[in-house]
Amino acid sequence: MPKTRHRIYGIFSTKKVVKIGTGATQRKKIHKIYWHVNEIEDDLIEIQPLNSNYQPHGPKKIIPKDTFMATFDAEPEFYAFKTFTPRDSTKQQYSSTKQRQVSDKQDKKNEAPTLDYITNIKNNFNLALLYVQQGQTEKAQDILDRLLKLDVPLEERHKHTFNEFAIDLRKHRLYYEALKYYNQILRITKNDEHIYFNMARVYYCLNEYEKCIKYLNKALQLNKDFTIAKKFLQFIQKKIDSEQNKTYKLTI
C-alpha cells in the first residue's frame, strides 16, 4: 500500500461531557469543541480552540500526533456550513481611523484561516488516507462518505481533484470507494474519456471485465483515437478469450 505524506491542517473537533443540574435531575450533555489544527512537524500538532464566532482564540498547544489521531475528529462539513463574521462588519463598529486600525490588526491576528471548500475537502481526504495507512478503516470510511455527501456546488474544474482522489483510492485498493468518487465526477461532466478509462481500470482490478469493457467503450466513443484505451480493450479481450473463450466487440 503506498505511503503518502500529507500535512494535517484545518478545523477538527473534540467532545466534552458536560453535567447539567444536580442530584436526581442531573443530566449529561455532549459539548463539541472546535479546534484549528496545524501539523508543524512530523509528530507534533499545534492546536488552538475556536471561539463562539468560530475564530481561533486562546492559547495554542502542542500535542503528539498519535494523541491527535486518537482523540480528534474530522469536520469536513465545517467550511461548507459555518458562517464567519467578516472583518469589514467588525470595522464598521468603530468611528475613528485609529480604532479601525486596531480592530484590523486584532482581526488579522485571530481570524480563521481562509480555506475554500475544495481545499478543505483535500485536507480531509488526505486525513482519510492517513487513517487507512494506520489501519483505522472506520474513521477513514466515515470521512470519505461525509465528503461525498457535502451539499456544495461542483464545477467542471473540480473534476481533477476528485479524479486524483479516486486514483489514490484505487492505489490503496479501495476500489468501491474509488468508484463512488468517479460517479461524483460524472455529476460534473460526462464528456471526459479519461474518467471512463480510469473507471475501467478500477473494474479491471475488481475482475469485473464486462464493466471494464463497457467503460473503455464509453471512452472510445468520446475519442476513437484514444490509443491506450484501444490497447487496454484488446488486452482485456485476449484475456477473456483465453480464460472464458468469450469475445466482446468494440461498440464504436
Image: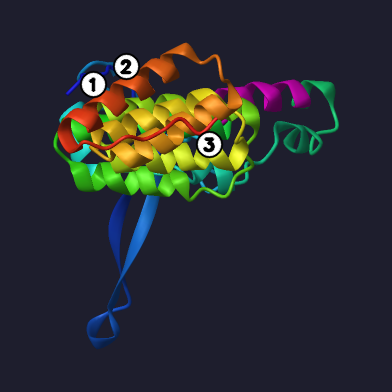
Q: Marks 3 and 1, Cα distance to the nearest angstrom?
A: 35 Å
Between circles 3 and 1, the one closer to the viewer is 3
CB under 8 Å between callouts 1 and 2?
A: yes
Name which residue type carries label 2: Ile
Q: Residue at x 42, y 14 (%)?
A: 228
Q: Residue at x 24, y 87 (%)?
A: 24
Mark carried by residue 44: 1
Quarter of the figure with residue 100: top right
- Seen from the viewer's position, the closer of residues 157 and 85 is 157
Please tell me whether residue 28 is drawn above or below residue 208 in the rendered image: below
Dot 3 alpha-carbon crowd within 10 angstroms: few under 14, some 14 to 19, many 20 or more = many
Quarter of the figure that contains the N terminus: top left
- Asked if residue 153 lies left or right of residue 233, the reply is right
CB under 8 Å between callouts 3 and 1?
A: no
Mark carried by residue 40: 2
- Colour basis: rainbow
Q: Reply yes or no: does residue 104 show up in magenta.
A: yes
Q: Residue at x 34, y 28 (%)?
A: 201
In magenta, the rendered stretch is 100-113
Name which residue type carries label 3: Ile
SS at mark 2? strand
- Seen from the viewer's position, the closer of residues 183 and 96 is 183
Locate residue 115, reporting x and y percent: 55, 29
Dot 1 alpha-carbon crowd within 10 angstroms: few under 14, some 14 to 19, many 20 or more = some
Circle 3 sits on which residue?
A: 185
Q: Residue at x 58, y 21 (%)?
A: 223
Locate residue 53, reporting x and y percent: 57, 45
Quarter of the figure that contains the C terminus: top right
Please tell me whether residue 54 is drawn above or below residue 4 in the rendered image: below
SS at mark 1? strand
Name which residue type carries label 1: Leu
